[in-house]
Image (cartoon, rainbow, N blue to C red):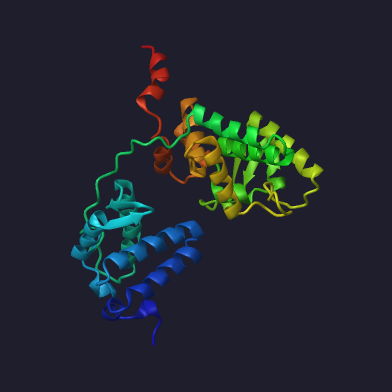
Amino acid sequence: MPPFHELPTQQKKEQELDTVFKIYLSEGEYIRRLSKHTIKGYSEVYLTFKKIVPEVRSIEDLHPHLIQEFFKRLGTRVRKVGAQTKVGIKASTTSTYYNKLMVFFRWLEERGYVKEHYLTQSIRRPPTPIYDDEKALTNEEVSKIIASISLKTVENSFLNKRDIAIISTLLYTGIRRGELLGLRIQDIDFEQKQVFVNHATSKSKANRYIPLHPTLHYHLKEYLKELRKCKYSCEYLYVSSKSDNGLTKEGLRHWVKRYKVRSGVPFHLHRFRHTFACGLAKNGADLISIMKLLGHTSTRMTERYLRSINTKDASIYLQKLTF
């Protein structure tokens, strides 16, 4: 049998969609070098698509009206979320499904599995979601989180220094979860006053340096003193409180849960990234600088992080206008 890319168009159409999707994911992982998080996102959307429109089995079954039917069913299905019953999904989630599916459909068109523009130009884009939520933390919320750490870890110097350093790192670098867990002690350059984010842990697959804020500089110094006192030998910056190993995703998840309860603030790690971006913008940083510090590859993504800035926040700049 000839290689898959040499198959006649009709044979390609008759291929099981699952088989082709695996090829698509493999190309994304090993050629486009997409992160595991991105690959997982595509997989989850695809599995939901197959679950909601089970009548789509092969590429030949991919008709625009069935894809429209998917979004109709997605928006009207009844779901159980804990003790609650919910109908449909948020506009932002619909937009996420659309964007991820369109990337796959465009790939099918480019590879000759379906006719060019057959899917991508036949499916109407859902309305752009209106974001009225506050992604960035307020100063009061940040103070509550820090206070919950200081009050609850006062008798354990190591936990106190580590957890304050973690909060400071999130607030003053805006790094992602994987980047935080991947930080090594050697990535902190006190002489050059910068934090190195290795491409291996970054979603953008590029190295970057983030200036070391004075507050973060102080808390890292304090934490590293405590780390040496406790005789840790692990290369990672943030370590487990139970063993000489780096802090894990599961450990960080419990960390967030613990301080969410203690502070009363419904936060998640990504809110610190939004807080960092909005804080830079409110202090006059230009969009390109914010983009580079966040490790984005385009300003479009960065602009999404700044949607928490409202007209009240912008009033200070209005007062400075002179003509």
Residue furthest to the bottom = 1
Quadrant housing the N terminus:
bottom left
Residue 66 coordinates in the image, percent (x, y)? 21, 65
Residue 98 falls left or right of residue 238: left
Would you place residue 54 above or below residue 291 in this image? Answer: below
Residue furthest to the front:
83
Q: As rendered, which of 73 and 98 lies closer to the eye?
A: 73
Please provide percent x and percent y for residue 208. 58, 44
Disc tally is 0
Q: Left of 65 or right of it: where is 85?
A: right
Residue 161 position by quadrant: top right
Q: Which residue does the image show at 55% across and 48% down from the upper left?
A: 177
* Image: 6 above or below 160: below
Residue 229 visible, this orientation: yes
What x and y, as percent, mark residue 229?
81, 42
> Residue shown at 57%/38% (left/top)?
173
Name the image quarter holding residue 301. Answer: top left
The residue at 72%/39% (across/down) is 156
Residue sticking out furthest to the left? 65
Quadrant location, the C terminus: top left
| Residue 133 % position (x, y) | 37, 36
Q: Does 129 sit above or below residue 76?
A: above
